[in-house]
Image (cartoon, rainbow, N blue to C red):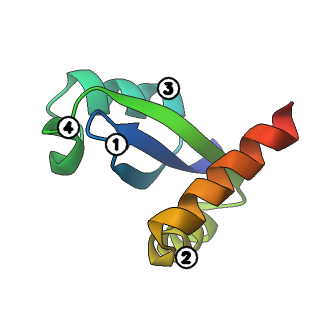
Amino acid sequence: MSPWYIYIVECKDGTLYSGITTDVTRRIAEHNDSPKGARYTRARRPVALVYKRKCASRSDASMKEYALKQLSREEKIKLIKKKKLSRA
């Protein structure tokens, strides 16, 4: 069983888009190069992955995505920066 992830991409216009998937690499490619990309990102290509987080299940990923979408842009940016700092 594949793990689920929540992710945030930054679009060409600087906006942020979040989603869930079992394959982040494939999903980013779809956002950039395929009609399977979200309508929002198709109009704002290219997108770049700025955040991802592994989740326990699809249900867990969906709940975390909902919570993520409730955050303000500033809160999302803080989350992205915090994740980058923890990798350093």
- Of badges 3 and 1, the one in the foreground is 1
Residue tagged 4? 44
Residue at image position (24%, 38%) is: 37
Query: Dot 3: within a 10 Å radius of its alpha carbon, few (fewer than 14), some, or many (20 or more) residues?
Result: few
Q: Are marks 2 and 4 in contact (CB under 8 Å)?
A: no
- Of badges 1 and 4, the one in the foreground is 1
Q: CA distance from mark 3 to mark 2?
A: 23 Å
Q: Are marks 1 and 2 in contact (CB under 8 Å)?
A: no
Instruction: Indicate the position of residue 39 as horizontal and vertical percent values.
Output: 15, 48
Q: Are marks 3 and 1 in contact (CB under 8 Å)?
A: no
Residue at image position (39%, 51%) is: 16
Q: CA distance from mark 3 to mark 1?
A: 20 Å
Q: Is residue 71 left or right of residue 47?
A: right
Q: CA distance from mark 1 to mark 2?
A: 21 Å
Q: Is residue 6 left or right of residue 42?
A: right
Does label 4 or label 3 sit earlier along the sequence? 3
Q: Residue type at mark 3?
A: Thr
The quadrant of the picture occupied by the N terminus is top right
Does label 1 or label 4 sit earlier along the sequence? 1
Please, what secondary structure does the residue beneath circle 3 have?
helix
Instruction: Indicate the position of residue 85 as horizontal and vertical percent values.
Output: 81, 41
Residue 23 at least partly seen: no
Residues 85 and 48: in front is 85
Does label 2 or label 4 sit earlier along the sequence? 4
Please, what secondary structure does the residue beneath circle 2 have?
helix
Q: Are marks 4 and 3 in contact (CB under 8 Å)?
A: no
Residue tagged 3? 25
Q: CA distance from mark 4 to mark 3?
A: 18 Å
- Of badges 4 and 3, the one in the foreground is 4
